[in-house]
Image (spheres, rainbow, N blue to C red):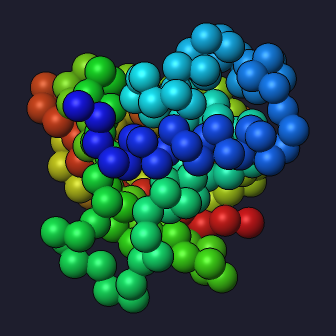
């Protein structure tokens, strides 16, 4: 059974495409995702992966957080841990928690990510070119490649960079890696 967040996400993705006057073929050309996959996503037949959402966000010039925030209720000033939105890509071994959801007029947000051992997520292009990120590893080990520059991070390490090209998050193991990402829009 699909959850309500996935259903709202499917509807929002379809609305964004239609609002831009793009056909499924247009969106497929902009994302490199097949027309049939996009159609199935918009009809709510499949759950999006982190990679697929990344490609859609790049086409729309949005962050993943903004897209997810579009399908969530307006966030309050204080977000209790039990109320923080959690999104999972089970097939990729990735869990994403919006610790401080994006809010109109604010440029920063805080995200918690967890990658299972061996998980490997790549994003072909930044959702917003020049977006600043701070990645702080809380537990475990993370191999983060920023625009083809590899970084090996352990617990307590923090990497600050701007998104200009592709990124890759990989957990070499042996256990899960938990990290915080602070996103600052340009």
In this rendering, is residue 105 above or below 161? below
Q: Residue at x 61, y 41 (%)?
A: 13
Residues 170 and 82: in front is 82
Name the image quarter holding residue 94.
top left
User: Which quarter of the rendered picture does the N terminus lie within?
Assistant: top left
Q: Residue at x 84, y 44 (%)?
A: 20
| Location of residue 68 in the rendering, given as x and y in whole percent from the top left corner | 49, 54
Classify residue 10 as left or right of residue 75.
Answer: right
Figure label count: 0
Classify residue 162 as left or right of residue 74.
Answer: right
Looking at this view, name the residue that lies furthest to the right.
21
Classify residue 111 as left or right of residue 27.
Answer: left
| Location of residue 58 in the rendering, given as x and y in whole percent from the top left corner | 70, 39
Residues 7 and 150: in front is 7
Q: Residue at x 68, y 13 (%)?
A: 35
Residues 165 and 50: in front is 50
Looking at this view, name the residue that lies furthest to the left.
175
In this rendering, is residue 183 above or below 4? below
User: Which quarter of the rendered picture does the C terminus lie within?
Assistant: bottom right
| Location of residue 90 in the rendering, given as x and y in whole percent from the top left corner | 26, 28
Residues 133 and 84: in front is 84
Q: Residue at x 63, y 31 (%)?
A: 55
| Location of residue 153 in the rendering, given as x and y in whole percent from the top left corner | 35, 42
In this rendering, is residue 160 above or below 174? below
Name the image quarter holding residue 95.
top left
Is residue 117 visible from the viewing direction of this image?
yes
Is residue 161 visible from the viewing direction of this image?
no
């Amino acid at each position: 059974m699909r959850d309500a967040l996935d259903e709202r996400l499917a509807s929002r993705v379809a609305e964004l495409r239609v609002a831009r006057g793009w056909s499924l073929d247009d969106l497929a050309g902009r994302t490199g995702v097949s027309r049939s996959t996009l159609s199935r996503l918009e009809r709510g037949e499949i759950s999006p992966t982190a990679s697929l959402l990344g490609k859609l966000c790049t086409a729309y010039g949005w962050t993943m957080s903004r897209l997810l925030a579009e399908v969530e209720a307006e966030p309050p000033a204080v977000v209790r841990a039990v109320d923080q939105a959690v999104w999972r890509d089970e097939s990729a071994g990735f869990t994403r928690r919006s610790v401080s959801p994006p809010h109109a007029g604010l440029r920063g947000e805080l995200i918690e990510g967890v990658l299972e051992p061996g998980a490997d997520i790549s994003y072909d292009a930044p959702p917003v070119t020049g977006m600043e990120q701070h990645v702080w590893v809380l537990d475990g080990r993370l191999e983060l490649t920023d625009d083809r520059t590899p970084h090996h991070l352990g617990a307590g390490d923090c990497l600050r960079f701007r998104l200009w090209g592709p990124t890759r998050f990989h957990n070499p193991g042996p256990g899960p890696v938990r990290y915080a990402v602070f996103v600052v829009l340009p």
